[in-house]
Image: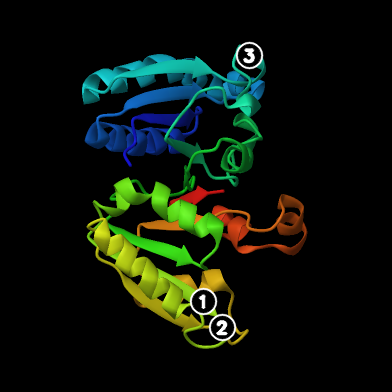
Amino acid sequence: MSYKDILVYLDPTPASAARLGVALDIAAFEGARLIGVDACTDDAFLGDWRRAAIEIEPSFKDALRDKGVEGEFHVAGSRGTLVLQDYALPADLIVAPAPSSEARKLIHSALPDDAVIKAGAPVLVIPSDWPAGPLGKNVVIAWNGSREAKRAVREALPLLKRAEKVAVFVFSQSRSTLRESGERLISHLARHGVTAKVSDWTNTGEVSAIEAMFADLDTQDADLVVAGAFGHSRVFESLFGGVSLDLLRQPVLPVLMSH
């Protein structure tokens, strides 16, 4: 698998520049076309944000030219002909903003949750406070053996093949409940040229899966998490928390999710 069409959602916030940089780097490496989508709300064109909002398209086209990447630009939401929820643009990878931000009212409210559920493509969610830097050198796979997790791994393969370190993190009630499944995943990844190791954490009820993952020695230097999304219904996740939402809300690491 390779990424040949990559879509990135853009807005007037400073975080958008880091998001575009990630998308450009992946597109350049993969020889992919980059599709820029203006995901601004009407509020983005008011007050102090107006200038940055107006410059999204020319800045995107300048960045394409500077990087030597082929691409195109679209406008989503009420101001454009492309309705964001329709996800009319095919893509192998979507790069989207995280759900929490001081400038949340400037970005279409459907992002990133609806993209994860409806787009039919893996979504790379970049936190608004993420300090732009290496992405995908040290990857953690949040593994629970589910269909969603398997799909996320498959769709992350272009990034996993470039990684210097891959840890398969399993979090289970009794030690090594998922370890056998994790070991099979490692064998599968090896056939794709990816070297990985299992990091097994026993769930004692004292910490959450996310807390354990961030505390684990094998994952502390991670710069990307790969995870399945919304294994339960979206309503269940909203009412009871859930690992998917916890991952989306954490402000530290980019997360590649697949549903």
Label 3: which residue? 79
Rendered position, 164 above or below 53: below
Nearer the observer: mark 3 or 2; the answer is 2
Q: Secondary structure at mark 3?
A: helix
Q: CA distance from mark 3 to mark 2?
A: 48 Å
1 and 3 marks in contact (CB < 8 Å): no
Which image quarter: residue 99? top right
Which element type, helix, strand or loop, lies under badge 1?
strand
**What's the residue type where badge 3 is placed?**
Arg
Residue named by callout 2: 203
Q: CA distance from mark 2 to mark 1?
A: 6 Å
Residue 244, position as x, y percentages in the image: 59, 57
Q: Earlier in the sequence, mark 3 or mark 2?
A: 3
Q: Which badge, 1 or 3, comes first in the chain's sequence?
A: 3
Specify the quadrant that holds the N terminus.
Answer: top left
Closer-to-camera residue (147/168): 147
In this rendering, would 156 be left or right of 204? left
Q: Residues within 10 Å of mark 3 (few under 14, many from 20)?
A: few
Give the label on residue 171, or none: 1
Where residue 247 sits, quadrant-wise, is bottom right
| Residue at the (65%, 35%) spot, across then down | 110
In front: mark 1 or mark 3?
Answer: 1
Residue nearest the observer in this picture, 215 or 237: 237
Q: Are marks 2 and 1 in contact (CB under 8 Å)?
A: yes
Q: Earlier in the sequence, mark 2 or mark 1?
A: 1
Tell me the residue at 75%/58% (across/down). 236
The numbered mark at residue 28 is: none
Residue positioned 63% across, 54% down in the render = 230
